[in-house]
Image (cartoon, rainbow, N blue to C red):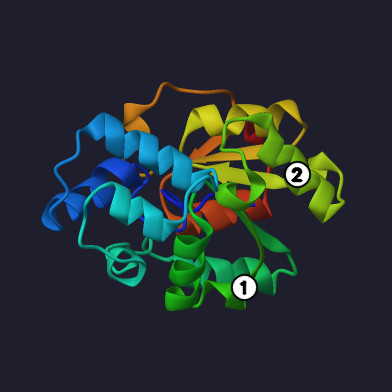
Amino acid sequence: MLDAMGVLYRDGDVRGRVLLPYLRERGCRAPERDVHAAYQAVTLGRMSTGAFWAALGAAAGDEDYCRRHTLTDGTPDALAALAGDGLELACLSNDAAAWSALLRRRFGLDRHIGRWFVSSELGARKPDPGPYEAVLAALDVPPAQVVYVDDRPVNLTPARALGMRTVLFRSDDTAAHPAGGPERAVATMPELVAAIRAPGPGTG
């Protein structure tokens, strides 16, 4: 189970590094607190993406915005390697469903990731326990058989509490967040593949 922003995609702080600069370029002058509130609403499914752009006064659109995202180096090869090992791959992401779908189609991630759990469809955002519980119920597997990967320690805590094994992926934004628990930390996709293939005592 992989996080999207900061794991599959390069920028973990997507609101600060991608969305806000994009909005400013598209004429949005709303205070950051209003952007944050609207982002929370759209990623919780309380607002459509069209209403989001309109509420912030931005001449923007979903496809144009999604072109600003980039994959983490090595993502396609890592997914192919893990899928080749016979692992079922899934994603748990704080995002709007429309943006999530556009991005995974753009980069062809559906080829290897079969299940996508998106906060706007779940009605809850990590690190609330609800998304993790929904994932376990949908996958119908014991928590100990799930390895959860995220770039934010706070998002690993609920997964670890439910019995999942956890791996911290050190994105460019990880340093901005307090250290978490005992999980193994990796900094590249090849290191992540190795950690998942050979989980040891350090994986939580």
Instruction: Look at the picture and state if 196 lies above or below 125.
Output: below
How many numbered marks, from 0 up? 2
In this rendered view, identify the residue nearer to me: 188 or 143. 143
Instruction: Look at the picture and state if 117 lies above or below 149.
Output: below
Helix, strand or loop at label 1? It is: loop
Residue positioned 23% across, 33% down in the render: 32
Residue positioned 46% across, 51% down in the render: 7
Quadrant the C terminus occupies: top right
The answer to whether residue 172 is seen in the rendering is: no
Dot placed on the residue nearer the N-terminal end, 2 or 1: 1
Tell me residue 45's x, y (percent): 55, 48
Q: Does residue 156 appear to the left or right of 29 in the view shown?
A: right
Tell me residue 51's x, y (percent): 39, 54
Residue that label 1 marks: 112
Label 1: few (<14), some or many (≥20) within 10 Å? Answer: some
Label 2: few (<14), some or many (≥20) within 10 Å? Answer: few
Q: For the residue marked with disc 1, what is the amino acid?
A: His
Q: Toward which corner of the image does residue 130 lie, by quadrant?
A: top right
Tell me residue 90's x, y (percent): 66, 59
Residue 154 is marked as none
Helix, strand or loop at label 2? It is: helix
Q: Does residue 12 appear to the left or right of 164 in the view shown?
A: left
In this rendered view, identify the residue nearer to me: 12 or 58. 58
Distance from Cα at disc 2 to Cα at disc 1: 21 Å
Residue positioned 74% across, 47% down in the render: 135
Eye-nearest disc, 2 or 1: 2
Instruction: Look at the picture and state if 26 lies above or below 112.
Output: above
Residue that label 2 marks: 134
Tell me residue 101's x, y (percent): 51, 68
Residue positioned 47% across, 49% down in the render: 47
Q: Does residue 69 appear to the left or right of 116 in the view shown?
A: left
